[in-house]
Image (tube, rainbow, N blue to C red):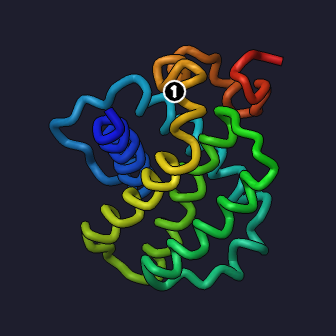
């Protein structure tokens, strides 16, 4: 089961990063979860990029290794209070999108392996730190059925109930 879950989350991360990079996803029919995630995470990403432009401009992301280190550091800080909700899960993908864009600015064009590595460490973080919460709170199926404005605003208790 864990292997299937990892592949599913990895696919969500890959789809999102392709969306951020505006890569055509030919022949693929995105599932509803991926479509919703792209819509919400991209909106969050745009807000973060606008609101934190000065801070983000100081990040020196010139390699996948530097992106991985920064991702790990930011995610540890984001979840250090132990609170998990769908809004925070969306921020994981949104921050991955920010990192891939910064990498793109420094390394044009990105190798497919770069895209693969970034989506891998996003999925790895989710599986190691968040997957149990996702399972206990209805899984990705529940995520698909939550009103978008509630996901984006994180207006849910950590147990998945609406505020």
Q: Is residue 54 above or below residue 51?
A: below
Tag 1 secondary structure: helix
Residue found 57% across the figure and 48% down from its top: 129
Q: In the shown orientation, is residue 83 left or right of residue 44? A: right
Query: Of residues 38 and 76, which is closer to you in this image?
Result: 76
Locate residue 42, reporting x and y percent: 56, 45
Task: Give residue 9's quadrant in the image.
Answer: top left
Of 138 and 46, nearer the camera is: 138
> Quick one: 65 or 114, which is closer to the camera?
65
Tell me how many marks there are: 1
Percent x, y of residue 124: 44, 55
Mark 1 = which residue? Answer: 135
- At a point 29% along the width and 41% down the height, the residue shown is 3
Structural crowding at the residue carrying mark 1, measured as other residues with C-alpha within 10 Å and reported as few (<14), some (14–19) or many (≥20): few
Q: Quadrant of residue 110?
A: bottom left
Left/right placement of residue 47 relative to residue 33 reads: right
Residue at 76%, 24% (x, y): give it: 156
Q: Work out which quarter of the rendered image holds the N terminus and state it.
A: top left
Residue at 47 percent of width and 66 percent of height: 100
In depth, the one of 96 and 68 nearer the eye is 68
**Quadrant where the image shows the C terminus:** top right
Residue found at the very far left of the displayed protein = 27
In the image, residue 121 sits, relative to residue 2, either above or below, namely below
Depicted 3 relative to depicted 111: above or below: above
Give x and y (percent) for residue 107: 39, 82
| Coordinates of residue 82 in the picture (x, y in percent) | 76, 45
- Tell me where residue 151 sits by quadrant: top right
Q: Is residue 87 left or right of residue 27?
A: right
């Amino acid at each position: 089961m864990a292997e299937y879950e990892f592949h599913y989350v990895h696919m969500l991360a890959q789809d999102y990063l392709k969306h951020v990079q505006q890569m055509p996803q030919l022949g693929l029919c995105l599932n509803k979860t991926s479509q919703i995630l792209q819509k919400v995470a991209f909106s969050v990403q745009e807000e973060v990029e606008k609101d934190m432009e000065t801070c983000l401009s100081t990040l020196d992301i010139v390699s996948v290794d530097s992106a991985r280190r920064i991702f790990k550091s930011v995610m540890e800080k984001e979840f250090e209070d132990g609170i998990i909700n769908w809004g925070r899960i969306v921020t994981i993908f949104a921050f991955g999108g920010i990192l891939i864009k910064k990498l793109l600015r420094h390394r044009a064009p990105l190798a497919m392996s770069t895209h693969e590595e970034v989506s891998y460490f996003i999925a790895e973080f989710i599986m190691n730190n968040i997957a149990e919460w996702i399972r206990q709170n209805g899984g990705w199926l529940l995520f698909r059925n939550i009103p978008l404005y509630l996901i984006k605003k994180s207006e849910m208790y950590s147990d998945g109930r609406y505020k």
